[in-house]
Amino acid sequence: MRIDHLAALTAAFVFPLFPAWSFEIELERNFTRPGNQEQLDIISTADLGPFTPIISAFQDENPGIDIRYVVASSVELFKALHAENASFDLAISSAMDLQIKLANDGKSVPYTSATTSRLPGWAKWRNEVFAFTREPAVLLISRKAFSALPVPRTRIELIELVRSHPDVFRDRVGTYDVRSSGLGYLFATQDSRNSEVYWRLTEVFGQLGSRLYCCSAEMIADVENGTLALAYNVLGSYAQRELSDGGGNAQLVTFEDYYNVMLRTALIPASATNVSGAGRMIDFLLRLDLRPDLVERSGFPAIPLSGSGGLDNTNSIHLGPSLLVFLDKLKRRKFLEYWSSSLRLDGEPGDRAEQRILE
Amino acid sequence: MMPRVSSGSIRLRLTTQLVVVAAVLSIVFVYSVWSVGKNTAETTQDKVLSAAAASIADALRTERGELVVDIPYSTFSMLEAISDDRIFYRIIVNGTTVTGYEDLPADPSLVDSRVPHFSNNVFVGEDVRTVAVKRSFSALGVPVDVVVFVAQTRAGYTRIASDVLSVAAWVGSGFFLFAIVLCLVASQSALRPLREVARAVERRGPEDLRPMRQLTPVEIAPLVSALNGFISRLESSLIRAEEFIADAAHCLRTPLAMIRTNAEIALRTTRSTPSRQALREILKAADESSRSTGQLLDHATVTFRSDNMKVERVDVVSLVADTIDRFEPVAEMKGIKLLSTPGRTTVDCRADPVLLRSALGNIIDNAIKYSPADSVIRVSTDLPLDRIRISVCDQGRGFGEKSCEMLTGRFTRGDNVEDIIGSGLGLTIVAKVVDSHQGELCIASNPEGAGTCVSIILPH
Amino acid sequence: MRFLLVEDNKRLSKAVATRLELDGHVVDDVSDIDTAETMLGVAEYDMILLDLMLPDGSGSDFLRSLRSKDNGTPVIVITARTELTDRVDTLDLGADDFLVKPFAFPELQARCRAVLRRKRGRSVNVAKLGNVAFDILDGTLTVNGQVVTLRNQELRLFEILFCAPQRIHSKAHLVDRLFSFGDSGSENAVEVYIARLRKKLRGSDLRLETLRGRGYRLSSNS
């Protein structure tokens, strides 16, 4: 089943506060405290759940700031800031490529502080895009489905396994709809770069009929409830968090051949009105590693600042303008054509999201 | 006497010139390093840009008669490897933008096939360097021109250039400071031979008019030889001056002696009262001119000599005793007693004895001249306040109302001595001698009654 | 006294000799060193008056050779140059004194006396007239064994009179001889000195007569 659009799932939370803008948001929450003078508008792809403790802690540390937290998909977030210059003070997104494109196209402003200067070079670009988490893409499997099967350690093993047990996996393989999910597209394109195995895997998924998702949360839920036998390229951090209070059916598998690590990034949009507040929030996020309680509650694997222990970033997706390549209109069309045909999807290879990004 | 310093110090000039040279060199160094750095940064950017554009162009292919644009992932990696600059691109096929930034300034008509074309533009508010690469294809027999534009902001390269400039500036300033120190040392040592010559000249005694013999650098040699030439001219002119004074004296005095002697003879032999009176006048006039001549010559000698003093250790007490001996017969003729107040046995002083004797002689001569018969002149030597004082006290008529300052002026005499022969040069000579010895001349009334005390006070 | 005058200017030399002879001295005047040395070989002099500039050499050379021959004859150098420069040299070479031209004869006399006084011991110069012994250099009179000191002008006045006894010296003549012409001498002063001398000569064989309108004369009773 293909979940066509976010709107259907989030309709109840959408308040068209700014009707002039055409981007769509999923949810908006105001964190206000009496007597606060300052306002900080954050647009983010991260769900409210993991972010609420972070915002509370930030407000404890920086009294006087009211925060409006708007959740949107990474594509909508990009659209809001790139095409519509919507006014937000801070943009937090898991779509590294789109964040880089915002910065490359002059849609963000640089920010430097003592904290940002301690951030490793690979975790920032132009002092405009700052990474504060390192979240791997993982394979999520259903324990029930895999009860009689070995847990695959590599993609090759996965291909073999799925091929040899079509009964178990038919219509029970889930992955991102890369046409609508920015993060899914990012993982997919990086996979395609990393290994030719990716296309074989996609083809196998296509043969069995795969379910496409907009978001990790739904995939996790469907693995948990047994709808899916496996979900490929699930955001590990989400899975971890969901599993901790789930039923225990889903199991997290990290491939041994390779895995992609997404860096969740924050930037200050050029349209920001409260740059200093945004800067303080960036500093706060970059220091997340020093707050194990928040790491615990949010489930965000924080990036340690330099000096607090080196970190191997081998698997991290490189944060830089090379990410722009897959955002190229023709390149994207080509990729989606490949992807669609591999998955044996009907209809147009491109989608509306593509149009939004590149026009 | 200090020389007139009109054209500043050689050391300053030398240092200034060296420093200017060092500054010019530093600036040239900084400028060339900076321009090389800038150039290198620009060239690097151009090379990377054209490599990136070429990699896109090289990936162009036709598939089933259709042009496929597939930007290699590495294209932007190579650009971002160099700097954090923003990257833009635009691909135009037969005049139509097929992908990339549609508003990136680009003019495909300027681009030649196979030769990268560079331009500077402004895009999204920033300076960008743009490279354009053109490729021509044939798709199903239809010619297709593809122009790939790749642009990059220049901040990183500007920063590289400015980093190079700042390093060059630091190194340049360091070099400059080091050069200043070297300049000071160099000018110091370059002028050392000059100072040595100056010291050698200073060390010489006043009578040492031998040519300088020390080894000097080539550059100083003309100075030393000029100095030697000057020394020899000085020596001969000194000799000439002394000879001239002596000759002048001789020429004047011998005829005067003749006049005087003959007049005396005539006076002794004639009995005619008018003739005797006339002869007395002649004798008076002869004495007057003799005295004036003597003092003029003395004055000339003293003037000449006080510029070329021959200072030596002089025992003032014995000099005073000698002078008293010399004047005793003259004083005796007038019934004047010259008394030396007994005091110390020796008092040493650094002075030119000829000048000092002349000064003392003039004072005593004056005292004898202006003292009445049967009076006493006391000459005493003492050491008040660690200085040497030679006082000559007479019982004469004093100097009247004229001030000391005026008395020492040339040809000035006291205002009550019109009846006594004198040119008025005596005290001028004394003052000159005293002056050239950095001493003082003091004229006061004799504390022991009538008369005057003239004192020479010299540094010990 | 007997003088040897070494002076190359003949006219001056002649005049000086004449002048000295007027005072009763004997003068040999020569004009070069050679002659001077010849004269010294044959006669003995009380005083040598030596000019420094001579045709056949310098006076100082002559002086040096004189002293090296152990000849102690007093020498007064007469220089026409400046006293300042010549003084040291000549005195160092053995001159006893020196005079700068032109000189007054009273000064020459005074210097001669001073020199001779310093050199005494070699020749005692005492003249006797009657019962008066006169030591010119010391300026003492010995009358009947009693020593009387004459001072300055008294001495010079007595010397003039003593050298030419019986001769009448006019007052004007005495004034001229006693006082150098720059000084203010007067006939009254002469009278004062005459009176003092008379007092000091009391009891001796010598008489100082006043010849009214003509002058003074020293005469002996004996």
Image (cartoon, coloured by chain):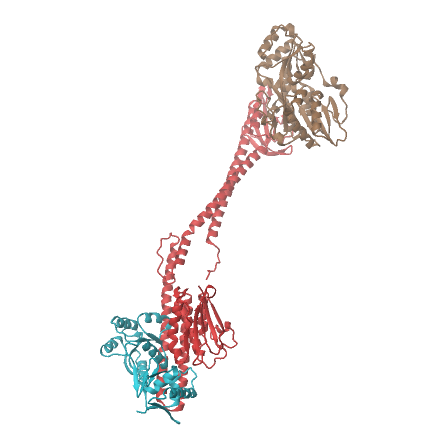
Chain colours: A brown, B red, C cyan
Which residue is farthest left?
Answer: C42
Q: In this picture, is C146 found above or below A39?
A: below
Figure quadrant of the N terminus of chain A: top right
Q: Is residue B223 left or right of residue A1?
A: left
- Image-quadrant location for residue A283: top right
The residue lying toward the viewer, choosing from A354 and B33, is B33
Point out residue A55 in the picture as x, y percentages from the top left corner: 70, 25
Q: Tally the marks.
A: 0
Which residue is farthest bottom?
Answer: C212
Asked if one can make out residue A342 in the rendered structure from this viewpoint, the answer is: yes
Point out residue B126 in the picture as x, y percentages from the top left corner: 63, 34
The residue lying toward the viewer, choosing from B445 and B133, is B445
Q: In this picture, is B229 found above or below B256?
A: above
- Image-quadrant location for residue A70: top right
Point out residue B44 in the picture as x, y percentages from the top left corner: 53, 31
Figure quadrant of the C terminus of chain A: top right
Asked if one can make out residue A347 in the rendered structure from this viewpoint, the answer is: no
Q: Is residue B94 left or right of residue C159?
A: right
Point out residue B159 in the picture as x, y percentages from the top left corner: 57, 35
The residue lying toward the viewer, choosing from B436 and A54, is B436
Q: In this picture, is C114 found above or below C199?
A: above
Q: Is residue C69 left or right of residue A172?
A: left
The residue lying toward the viewer, choosing from A96 and A142, is A142
- Image-quadrant location for residue A261: top right
Q: Is residue C178 left or right of residue A216?
A: left
